[in-house]
Image (cartoon, grey):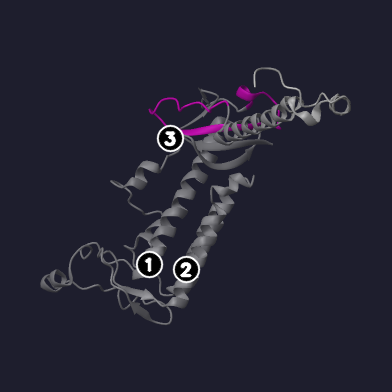
Amino acid sequence: MVQLHVKRGDESQFLVRTCGDTSVDALIQQITEIYNGRLRVGRISSEITELSEHGIALPPNMQGLTEEQIMELKLRDEWEEKCVPSEGPVLKKDEMGRRNGHAPNDKMKEVLMKTVEAAKALVSKKQAEANVCLTMEMVKEALDQLRGAVMIVYPMGLPPHDPIKMEFEHREDLSGTQASLEVITEDECQLWWAGQQLQRGKKLQDYIGKNEKTKLVVKIQKKGQGAPAREPLITDDQQKQMMLRHYRRQEELKKLEEANDDSHLDSAWADRQSLKKQFQGLSNIKWGPR
């Protein structure tokens, strides 16, 4: 199996396994699904954190308004009584005005946060450091864990306008957000390896040969952004190790120079003739004027 280390720019994303005879089109589909799935897990995890702190999302026409404005406009959240967290809510006002302030209690909050940590760890970038290849099944498992935790805490479900529910149902609207810039659709995705773009319609082995034990670094890029920067010949860690070895070598050479210092031979105790001179009375003879 060919192992691909997928990066976005210089930032490591995840590892995937594939075959040399896999088409570039199928490879792009596989990588974009995992890449965008990881982003979805991250967005949902972030919203669940807000859910655990401040409860369900307010209707769009009430978000950002003060209590006085809501009363003045006679607006009412019909979902407040329907979507109540298990074991009752705890009042925690949302200063941003996005959520209704009826948060889950500490026990239910712990259920949500433990699940968030587990789901994020499952698709974490640290998996690449541990040489664990990511699959779409792992991404789906992380999403299922998050969905299950929300169902435990909110058995009656979430309102249809809540970002978490919209994400689970693929109805999210990311237009105008930073998150929309991170998403790469299959149509606009490009894969680059060794400074060249992997062209659709070809197979991976057209570029790397038929060696199935190859490890490659491929970069995912949006169409029209040009070629990404090529990988440096040595990594930052390798450069640090080289500098450390150089420093240790210099220290060793200094110690060797000190060990080879022969200035001690000028000392009286190093004179082989000192005993003979003492017997002959020649040990304290000095030349020059007194």
Which one is in front in this view, the residue at disc 2 or the one at disc 3? 2
Residue range of the region highlighted in magenta in the rendering: 205-233
Outermost residue, bottom side: 87
Q: Which residue is mark 1?
A: 51
Instruction: Name the kind of residue labelled 3 in the image.
Output: Asp
The answer to whether mark 1 and mark 2 are in CB contact below 8 A is yes
Q: Residue at x 67, y 23 (%)?
A: 209
- Which is more toward the observer, 132 or 1? 132
Q: Residue at x 60, y 27 (%)?
A: 203
* SS for callout 1: helix
Q: In this rendering, is residue 219 above or below 149?
A: above
Alpha carbons under labels 2 and 3: distance apart: 35 Å
Q: Which residue is mark 2?
A: 112
Q: Position of residue 279 (x, y in %)?
A: 89, 28
The answer to whether mark 1 and mark 3 are in CB contact below 8 A is no
Q: Position of residue 89 (x, y in %)?
A: 36, 79
Alpha carbons under labels 1 and 3: distance apart: 33 Å
- Which is more toward the observer, 125 or 248? 248
Q: Quadrant of the N terminus?
A: top right
Q: Residue at x 36, y 74 (%)?
A: 103
Q: Which residue is mark 3?
A: 187
Instruction: Name the kind of residue labelled 1 in the image.
Output: Leu
- Mark 1 burial class by Cα count in 10 Å: few <14, some 14-19, many 20+: many
- Mark 2 burial class by Cα count in 10 Å: few <14, some 14-19, many 20+: many
Alpha carbons under labels 1 and 2: distance apart: 9 Å
Indicate whether residue 135 is drawn in magenta.
Answer: no
